[in-house]
Amino acid sequence: MASRAPRVEYLAGFRCPLGGLAAGKPRVLCHGAEVFLSTGSELVYVYDQEGRLLTAVYKFPGQVWHLELLALRRALYVLCAQSGIYCLSLDQAGRSVSQDGGDGGDSQGTEDEQDGSPPSSVIPVDPGACVLPDATLCAFTILDDVLVTLAQGPTQWKVQLFERPCPGEDPRPGGQIGEVHLSSCTPTAGSPGEPAAPRFLPVLCCASPPGSRAPHSSRGFALEGALFGLLFGAGAALLESPAILCGLPDGQLCCVVLRTLVTSRSAPGDPKALVKILHHLEEPVVFIGALRTEPLAEDVEDEHSDCLVVLGHHGRTLAIKASWNEAGHLAPELREYRLPGPVLCAACGGHSRLYLSSPSDLCVVDLARGGSPWDPAQPDGALGGLPSLLCPTSLSICSVVTLSVSSRTPEGGAELLALSAKGRLMTCSLDLHRETPCPTSVTSANTGQKIKELLSGIGTVSERVSSLKKAVDQRNKALTCLNEAMNVSCALLSSREGPRPISCAITTAWSCLQLQDVLTATCLLENSSSFSLDRGWALCVQVLSSSRALDLGSAGSAVTYTIPVDQLGPGGRREVTLPLGPGEDGALDLPVTVSCALFYRLREVVGGALAPTDPAQDAWSDECPPDVLPEQDGVCLPLSERTVDMLQSLRFPSLAVPPMQALGPLSPAGDPIHTFLGTCRGPGGQLAGPSSLRAKYLPPSVATIKVSTELLRAAFGDGHAGMSLGCATLQWLLAENAVGDIVRAQALSSVQGVAPDGTEVHLIVREVAVTDLCPAGPIQAVEIQVESSSLANMCRTHHAIIGRLQRMVVEQAARGSSPPDLRLQYLHQIHANHETLLREVQTLRDRLCTEDEASSCATAQRLLQVYRQLRSPSLLLL
């Protein structure tokens, strides 16, 4: 291309938000010397190219999504987000705005004014200028006296036709004259009563046949007769009716013949028959245009496009042209290409040339047949096909978010009007003949300019290469980390049976922290695999307390600790100790479930590799490239789980236990009242505190469970040989407590422990004989008795024992053991007695709600007696 004139000329700078303009919303239109521009905010600028002057700034009530100019009628139609369509008469609303306001001018004077605030001199648009109020409108176009709109419904897109109102007339539309629903759309989450803005706006334009009048819309085009008839049908060609093309965010390209849509209200038929799906790009449609790829015959005056072009957001391009097939028939030729993406904007101009902008470059693509001669013998000139490959030519211009082909195109060249991501309006002059200047015309000024351009190009290429090298290194590191994470995940998931390559053992113990006894859980992470846990891995420990651990459906507390695991190589260990309680109130809410899992943070490792490699891409990073990471941006691999109950939390000060078991006072520390009462002793050395009074005057709460000796011996096997069954049972119950070995060594069958809140819990195991249950004679059993002055601690201990016995019964049932013959009448009697007691409990509880204080004392005593009978059933685990 020739370089006699400046290639890029900056006209003005416009205010834009910090970070630059986002693609998809800015618009720029040109008519002669006038430029109508929107940066995606609520402002619309009118700029005079010849005078280099900003002539008007209009402020609309919402974000501007689209502009349409009717040049003959000097009317500007504007679509505002969640508001509707406004119409301005440019002759009546014209007003000059000085450049001193900071809104326009040359590039040198406005580069530092992009602070996101509106200019000082603006023209607020009267709400009465809204000709079609509709919050669901996403696109519109104008053809003759018809206004075509595309609205987003809850589940479908809707095309509507209105009689176009003119400026100065009644602002309301003249009336709806047609409507049809398109394919389903993905609903977007917005605030109640207000639709959410789509991520990608749909594309709407009109295609006219050769015989109709040229469309007034700036986005309309005329197609030659052969292509128009093949695309929209012979009926549309005979009626000479324009067709509406809709490019949807889901990738569908739909069309509706305008006159069939107008008559559908008076002669309704099948609505689905009005809509035709031409193609599916499988990515959001961002541009629809038309080109002329064949040369015109000498006797043809009107130039109509012979190729329809559709662009997707990620660069997929569709070209449709009428060509002759092997059978000698005229048929539509559809060909898909892949161009650099993501596509920010595009424009058609200069016969067969398509201009498209990506974050890194502005390119031009020529869809001509590559120099094939035109054969006038073929009808309609539809001779050649589409090129098999498109080769974009770089124009070395980046950060263009909206583009328009200027109507002042010089002969033999092209002039583009573009808006950059930083809000700069510029013209790009292209010499498409690639003329080579004469060597004699080269001057020292031209040589200096060429040297400047070369040095600037070298610096830009060097910076680009450095950025790309950094991006490649980041992605290589991310791929290495992902490969290591995949190996670790496969190793853990494939070793469900047997020892795991990466394990986490959970143990509990009492420790003294800040003069207070605290139950702690120690998680020992051990890496026995051949892989290394590097950056991105974390050990997540969740502590689930109280009723949520029991899965009772009520609320409970859950706390998750996340500990980064850095550089844990093969054979390495990492130990983490976490407090379980008691809390500030001195209570330990049991049972507590401790769960350990490995978590791999994808965003921490891969996020840098997915970041834009070009700083210019930061302006539209929210829209391209798409975010491939899910909301839960990580991989979670469960390792182990343990439930800590009352049996594991008991302490036994009367037994010789390890130092970790006997630390600290037995009552909750930090409470001065309990400390004082604990030191006060009455006559005889007895404690005078409230605990001693409760133990002296109130009987302890008792619960008993009977288990057959046959079941216990089958479950214990030979592991407890040489000791009594009562001692073996007590040792089995306290196996996860630190005193388990002491019970075995001392052959104990009863122990007295202390709960976390300082109250005593007594465990007694004795051998008994159960009569009246089996006709063959008494059944030998073991009775486990729990006593405590605290009803809550007794219930927690009773629940822990029941849980262990349930697991034992399930394991023995799986081995096929059968119980002895039982007296069913005796079991029925026990069941009936318990139902009677439960009904009495309900009656007593209802009575407590209505009686006075004097009468409720006797009722409460009876209720406690019934509870005591229920906690000591005559049933036996077999």
Image: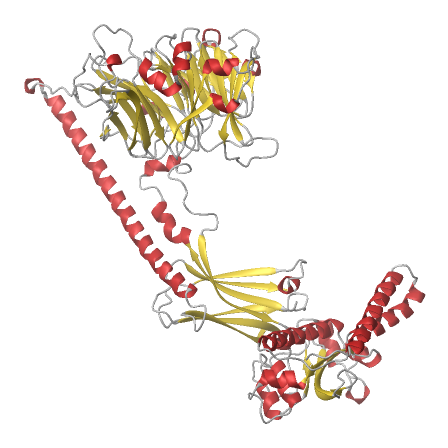
Q: Is residue 481 left or right of residue 164?
A: left
**Position in image of residue 26 (x %, y %):** 41, 25
In what quadrant of the picture does the N terminus appear? top left
Quadrant in the rendering for residue 277 = top left
Quadrant in the rendering for residue 68 = top left
In what quadrant of the picture does the C terminus appear? bottom right
Whether residue 366 appears in this view of the structure is yes
Q: Is residue 699 above or below residue 189?
A: below
Q: Is residue 23 left or right of residue 657?
A: left
Quadrant in the rendering for residue 106 = top left
Q: Is residue 611 left or right of residue 757?
A: left
**Most foreground residue, 151 or 836:** 836
* Colour logic: secondary structure
**Position in image of residue 405 (x %, y %):** 31, 18
Q: How many marks?
A: 0
- Residue found at the very far left of the displayed protein: 440
- Residue found at the very far bottom of the displayed protein: 722
**Most foreground residue, 261 or 556:** 261
Q: Is residue 188 above or below residue 417?
A: below
Q: Is residue 336 above or below residue 383?
A: below
Q: Is residue 141 left or right of residue 531?
A: right
**Position in image of residue 266 (x %, y %):** 56, 13
**Position in image of residue 90 (x %, y %):** 45, 9
Q: Is residue 559 above or below residue 690?
A: above
Whether residue 730 appears in this view of the structure is no
